[in-house]
Image (tube, grey):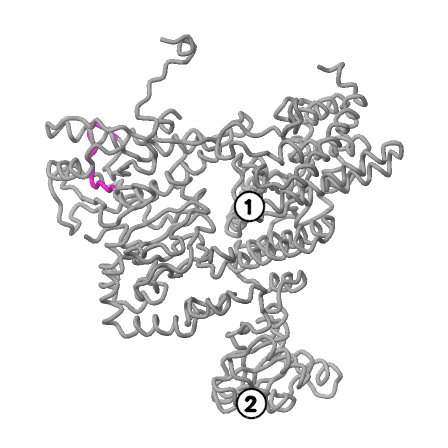
Amino acid sequence: MKNTISQRVADFLKGYPPFNFLHQKDLEKLSEQISIIYKEKDSVIFAENDKTHDSFYVVHKGAVALKKSTKNTVLDMCDEGDIFGLRPLLAQENYIMEAVAHEESILYAIPIAVFKPYALENRNVGNFLIESYASNTRNPYSDIHKDKLYGDDQLNENLHSSNHSFDLAPIKYSKKIVTCSPSTTVKDIAKIMNKKKVGAILIVDEMLPIGILTDKDLRNKIVTGDFPITTTAETIMTKPVITYPKKMTVTEAQMAMMKSNISHLCLTKDGTVNTKAVGILSKHDVMVALGNNPAVLIKALKRTKKIKEIKPIRNQIMQLLQGYLDQNIPMTLITKIITELNEACTTRVIEICIEKMSSPPPVKFAWLALGSQGRGEQMLHTDQDNAIVYENVNEVFRDETRIYFLKFAGLVNKGLFEIGYDYCPADMMASSPKWCMSLVDWKAQVHHWITNPGKNEVLLSFIFFDYSMTYGDSDIVNELSDAIFEYVKANPIFYMHLVSGALQSPSPTGFFRQFLVEQDGANKDSFDIKRRALMPLTDAARLLTLSHSVKGISNTAERFEKLAELEPNNRELYLSCSYSFKALLKFRTKQGLLHHDSGQFIELESLTKMEKIKLKRTFKTIKELQELISVRFNISNLV
Amino acid sequence: MSLFNFWKKEENNLFDENITIEETRFVVLDTETTGFDYDNDRILCIGALVLQNGIINVQESFEVYLEQEHYDKSTAQIHGILKDLLVKRPTELEALQQFLDFLGDSIIIAHHTIFDVTMINRALERNRLPQLQNKTLDTAYLYKKTLIQSHLFERKDHYTLDDLADKFDISKKDRHTALGDAYITAIAFLKIVKKLREKKAVNLNQIFKY
């Protein structure tokens, strides 16, 4: 029976092959017979060697990783609209890969018995399936090729070589070719290239490539004054075009470019100039294919036009992080690079959202990252904590401005959610009116926290005082920082609350020097590294730097280094704090990558003896630091 | 009674401690009505689906538009159900009987459950049928339990289905159709359970204690 849900399913499926080949009526019929399945992160959909289910799956929301359990390597990542688990059904063999929900996912299970007649009857559907297995891509018609193009067929070969042979992987090229006719003027060409953000344009005549113009040509021939900007393309283009067939490996492409000393290759249907151009391959594409490199990722970020395109880049950042950790690169360097990249992602989201608004921001503003993000210590996907501060406005425009920024913040928060930052459960986000205020309102708010320090006020100022600016106008932020220091100086009692806050985090070890573990919940019996080890250090660093009126440093490790400089007699302790913090952060990040979560909870059993000793060593430092604070601020008089 | 039990709080469990949420058959429902007055307004449509083990089977869903005399033009713009909609419509009695068959003794989940259940109970009363005896859960209430509790953050008193759909990134395409809303409610319920589990293990019995 056709109903609202089956309609909803049909509407989704019709956007993806092979379902887009089905007649609307058939698709509706098919949709009535499917099941909608919710899978929590990390739950298994089917395991290797399992008997086949009677349905195959389409990802509606989320992502599913296909793995070979022996190697524990992800062979393919399916996201929205991708099909998986179909081939074993058609081949009538057991599953040869394991499918695990990589994120929280919603799947559509389509019974093979219902689908098979369509595959047999509808030639387009049949062809799609044959082609997708033959070419080893899940979706041969897709615009964007996936990282891992290998499907089931090549699987066995690939498994033998465990090292990633990127060099021989087929290259991903841009299929959106920017072209113009031979008679286009150079001035117009420059405009087109600027708009499309490309470094080369193909000159075509009846679809056949006859020449190419690159940034370099414009520089060498036009800017030098040799030709006027009214020159037509055919006069100065490089010809003939060097063409290659589209099936190229990364290495081949690299060699071709070096051989002819060119930066762009034109790919045609059969590899000669006599067939249609199908793509352009730039040095940039080769760099991207060669692997992750922060500069390439930043460049790729700048080219994104939609928020959706940022998500895969975030995933690459995570891979980069994994690589850095594997290579044992110093943590200070890793945090800097990853924080920079994460910030670039946020900035891009903000820029895209500004374009989405119907008008530019009415006044200057700054987007602040709070908490761990503000301290530049956030490397994994965690919750959002952010705020907006904007210039003071005239009474008349007050509401209007507030509404503008709230709406804008709503877009940004949603965008950040889309690229993998969860919403803050306490609603500490710029889209909430309390975290989106004008400078004068923020000053009043901070003043209130400092002069009326209750438990919650201190907690809020903890989160807020670690801000750093992600985007916008730095003058506003500086003014706010100055105000905070002024208020704190005038209200010494506030220190006392910061002190008790800094000392309240529970000690990491119990009486018998064993680890204190969580008593209940999903993380029962695991060690909360954030609350018990990282937070005491962060809180202490904040307190001590604030008491020295150190401005502009919010990273915990850097704060300790600064403190070591300011108090030579405690130098050793502070440096070991800085070291401990970095060690703990590395620990957390590794755990997070391993379990694809925030890394907050550590299963003690998974640690080696060595790791446990390392962890415990940091606890000693924490204890010493807490003693120093209670002596210095004379806490015993307070409690 | 042993001495130890004496100190234990008296527990009145609704269900056996071993029953998991996964094995339980839930019916997630939503009604579209002519208005919010329990006495005068009528149900125009009942949408419901079965949720078990995280699976919603599309074939096993229920969507019935009812024949009603009472009609309020002003709410038509919300639910979009016109009086002479060309869908085969059973009488209220027929629809209720079909619904009761579908429901069985499952646990009811809805958003602001009290409203839908009261509307259905009033309709049952009019048709001289016994009242619903099913246990109920409310996603509007449960959602609040997933939020951090602090008096500093103003928690709203009422979270609408739209709020939940936004927070959980569920498409609002079929908002204000009974079955469409039931679907949003079902997905929201699953995500709420997941959130609650992050804090504490939850079985069927415990979710009723929130």
Q: Secondary structure at mark 2?
A: strand
Q: x%, y% of residue A487?
A: 75, 29
Q: x%, y% of residue A345?
A: 60, 54
Nearer to us: label 1 or label 2: 2
Residue at numbered disc 1? A409
Amino acid type indicated by mark 2: Ile
Q: Secondary structure at mark 1?
A: helix
- Tell me how many marks there are: 2
Q: Would residue B168 be found to the left or right of residue A574 on screen?
A: left
Which labelled disc corresponds to residue A210?
2
Task: Tell me which label, 1 or 2, sits earlier in the chain.
Answer: 2
Q: Would residue B7 be found to the left or right of residue A209 on screen?
A: left
Q: Magenta stretch: give its range.
A: B37-48
Q: Chain of mark 2?
A: A
Amino acid type indicated by mark 1: Ala
**10 Å crowding of disc 1: few (<14), some (14-19), many (20+):** many
Q: x%, y% of residue A633?
A: 79, 22
Residue located at (13% from left, 45% from top): B89
The residue nearer to you, when weighing B85 against A488, is A488
